[in-house]
Amino acid sequence: MTHTEFRRVYQADPEGIWTAPGRVNLIGEHTDYNDGLVMPFALPHTTSAAVSRRTDGLLRLHTANEPSAPVAELRVADLEPATVAGWTAYPAGVVWALRGAGHAVTGADIHYDSTVPVGAGLSSSAALEVVTALALSDLYQLQLSGWQLARLCQRAENVFVGAPTGIMDQTAAACCQAGHALYLDTRDLSQRQIPFDLAAEGLRLLVIDTRVKHAHSDGAYGERRRGCEQAAANLGVVALRDIAHDELDAALGRLADEEQRRLVRHIVTENHRVEQVVARLEARETRAIGPLLTAGHASLRDDFRISCAELDLAVEAALSCGALGARMTGGGFGGSAIALVEEAIADKVGEAVTAAFATAGHPTPRVFTAVPSAGARRLA
Ligand code: GAF
């Protein structure tokens, strides 16, 4: 399909087709820009790209998701931060970042096709960045590793697009493996693939997309990030990652500002929860991660304060119907929640959440089962 569409748009065959997934973060929220621990896994929802090189300095971009939109045409030599608006800023930013890193990318024709829900907190932008970076790395024979791709894509998003995100989403898109969650230390990017096969254990992880749109370039994400950095500076550490769980009370005692105390409490306890989730999964006690997920939600709601009525309702409705644990996932202020449930009651939990949304007068959420899937790769 992507191949046929590429032909229709550019009147030639693509040199290849690549794909990169959206992600769910199981636990470890807002820890990535604090040098902390995260644990995402890839969704089966992907962004695919059919790509050919160009030698004339043109970058041409088109997406099946906006079929009647004209092909966007940019000159790679003219790309500068904050000069491109809309979705094309992400691939343009990747080309800008690759060229800035010294890679002689001389242009490309790209046709995208995505099934990753946009604005749902499931990393559609990282999928778009990483599929672009991987395709260009392959075609221009740059041989960039997963973490190198992730770093370049993060730079594209931070500097070119202007969204001050961490590195979790790009690393998840680049490095996740099917049937596993990715235990990532965002300080040194060391990683471990943790087996995470819920179906084999009679469990399901539901994603509940509240359909409340969120955007990282909005001020609140950046405010939380600045607050954390300020708190780290006040505590005299490089990043909040440097506060161990058993040092938390002492650290809180050294902060006068209540807002900073809340931020610190979330980050330190969240890093600890990631370690506990990893330990339970490695001990094959998957059901026991439920309360840790729910505690993570309370911390994001009460201390980090990035939840919203719809996310709280999704979590409460899932828990009242028997979910083992539930939490918001991703950047917050909307987007999606996740719920860990026994397979036997999965449909009932989905229906209970949908009914609770109807009663509260919220739009119908989109509920689906998340199957831990593969990271970015070449398809053809
Ligand atoms: C967004 C960001 F892009 C990530 O870097 C991360 O901070 C996440 O929010 C919160 O954990 O997805």
Image (cartoon, helix red, strand yellow):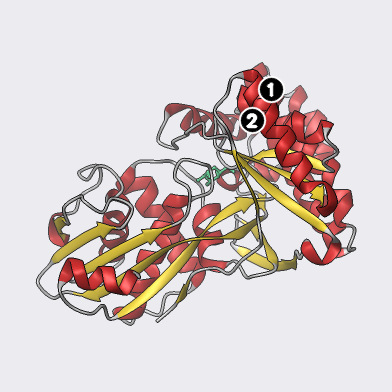
Relative image position of residue 258 (x, y in whole percent): 67, 17
Disc nearer the start of the sequence (1/2)? 1
Relative image position of residue 20 (x, y in whole percent): 47, 65
- Quadrant of the drawing holding the N terminus: bottom left
Is residue 139 in sight in this rendering? Answer: yes
Q: Residue at x 64, y 26 (%)?
A: 357
Q: Residue at x 24, y 75 (%)?
A: 52
- Quadrant of the drawing holding the C terminus: bottom left
In-image side of 213 versus 303 (left or right): left
Whether label 1 lies within 8 Å of ligand 1 gets the answer no
In-image side of 345 versus 375 (left or right): right
| Residue 255 disc label | 1
Dot 2 falls on a residue whose secondary structure is helix
In-image side of 319 versus 63 (left or right): right
| Residue 311 disc label | 2
In this view, the residue in front, 225 or 22, is 22
Relative image position of residue 119 (x, y in whole percent): 46, 40
In this view, the residue in front, 109 or 236, is 109
- Pair 1/2: label in front: 2
Q: Residue at x 42, y 30 (%)?
A: 218
Q: Residue at x 75, y 46 (%)?
A: 347
Query: Amino acid under label 1?
Result: Leu
In-image side of 83 versus 365 (left or right): left
Dot 1 falls on a residue whose secondary structure is loop
Above or below, 41 against 120 in this view is below
Q: Residues within 10 Å of mark 2 (few under 14, many from 20)?
A: many
